[in-house]
Image: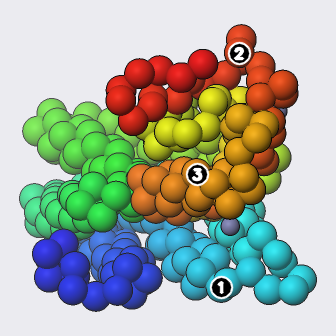
Amino acid sequence: MPQLLKSLPKATRIQTLAIGSIVVAVAVMAIKYVAYMKTGSVALYSDALESIVNVITAIAALTAIRVGIRPPDAEHPFGHHKAEYLSAVLEGALIIIAAIMILREAYDAFLNPRTLTEPALGLAINGFATALNAGWALLLIRSGRAWGSMALAADGKHILTDVVTSVGVFVGLVLAALTGWSILDPLLACAVAVNILWTGYKLAIESMSGLLDERASTEIEARIHRAIANNGAGALEAHDIRTRHAGRMTFIEFHLVVPGDMTVAAAHEICDRLEDAIEADLVDADVVIHVEPDEKAKPDAAIALNNEDGQTGT
Ligand code: ZN
Ligand code: ZN
């Protein structure tokens, strides 16, 4: 499928996958709810409710893509990439509601332990939904890697962690059905509720860091440094590199030191080459470069540039 989608333009491809994520998340949630109805298991109820988080996340992702894709306009000259942090607020609220609903149901099951009705059928249905989720997660990760979209791969990895929880619930319930320990059911549900709250906490931290212009990850910064070092021939050094990210975008700015007698046209040519190299490597990046003459050099804090003959400039 990544190959099949490859023929579409990038924005269409990513939107297609985002819509697919919503469809898969709703289907998984519905199937898991059927499994809960068949068994009366609180743990399966919690597993179904956990999918709500994925439905919301998938809708938020599509909104972020559709709004975030809008080009900068007069009122928003840096673009609309932070749109997704707004939906994160809604996600946080829903995550807390889902966790409270699960804990209430689990408390009920602690007080009145129930034996599961039709555990084999319920678990088979739940297992099918989990397999569907796993397949979709792998598709997202593969497409993300094939298209160089780290955000897409991250979405896939998030769904994969849910698959791990679901497998844990599945194994626990098989154990409960075999041993007759009905207490395992609400215990597993509580574990899922805690896991949902933990996911929500991480989402909230991530969104707040984004709103506060957190720097790009060490991995992305290393790639930027490498692109600068390999494409800055003709310039002397780069320093004061600052990065921040907004949604899927990374904004990068730095100072480029060139010989003081270099023409503006020549310096500009180097800047264009650096901008193209970084934007080609990171895909979702925006680069601004401030040019300085050699007396502004900061040798101690600079990235040395590889010159064309492979020598490192000063
Ligand atoms: Zn400077
Ligand atoms: Zn220019």
Label 3 vs label 1, nearer the camera: 3
Question: CA separation, marks 3 and 2?
Answer: 20 Å
Q: Amino acid at mark 1?
A: Arg
Q: Are marks 1 and 2 in contact (CB under 8 Å)?
A: no
Q: Secondary structure at mark 3?
A: helix
On screen, 244 above or below 308?
below
Q: Quadrant of ligand 2?
A: bottom right
Between discs 1 and 2, the one toward the N terminus? 1
Q: Are marks 3 and 1 in contact (CB under 8 Å)?
A: no
Q: Amino acid at mark 2?
A: Pro
Instruction: Decide which of 163, 306 is in the foreground and name it.
Output: 306
Instruction: Decide which of 17, 170 is in the foreground and name it.
Output: 17
Q: Position of residue 124 (x, y in %)?
A: 11, 63
> Which labelled disc corresponds to residue 137?
none
Q: State left or right for residue 257 relative to residue 247.
A: right
Which residue does the numbered mark 1 point to in the structure image? 70
Q: Secondary structure at mark 1?
A: loop
Q: Position of residue 142 (x, y in %)?
A: 22, 58
On screen, 32 above or below 8?
above
Between discs 3 and 2, the one toward the N terminus? 3
Instruction: Decide which of 251, 137 is in the foreground and name it.
Output: 251
Which residue does the numbered mark 3 point to in the structure image? 270
Q: State left or right for residue 270 relative to residue 239.
A: left
Crowdedness near tag 3: few (<14), some (14–19) or many (≥20) residues, C-alpha within 10 Å: some
On the question of residue 273 being in view, the answer is: yes
Q: Quadrant of residue 134?
A: bottom left
Q: State left or right for residue 83 relative to residue 95.
A: right
> Which labelled disc corresponds to residue 299?
2
Q: State left or right for residue 8 relative to residue 312.
A: left
Between discs 3 and 1, the one toward the N terminus? 1
Q: Looking at the image, which residue is at 89% across and 83% down?
A: 75
Q: Looking at the image, which residue is at 39% across and 35% down?
A: 308
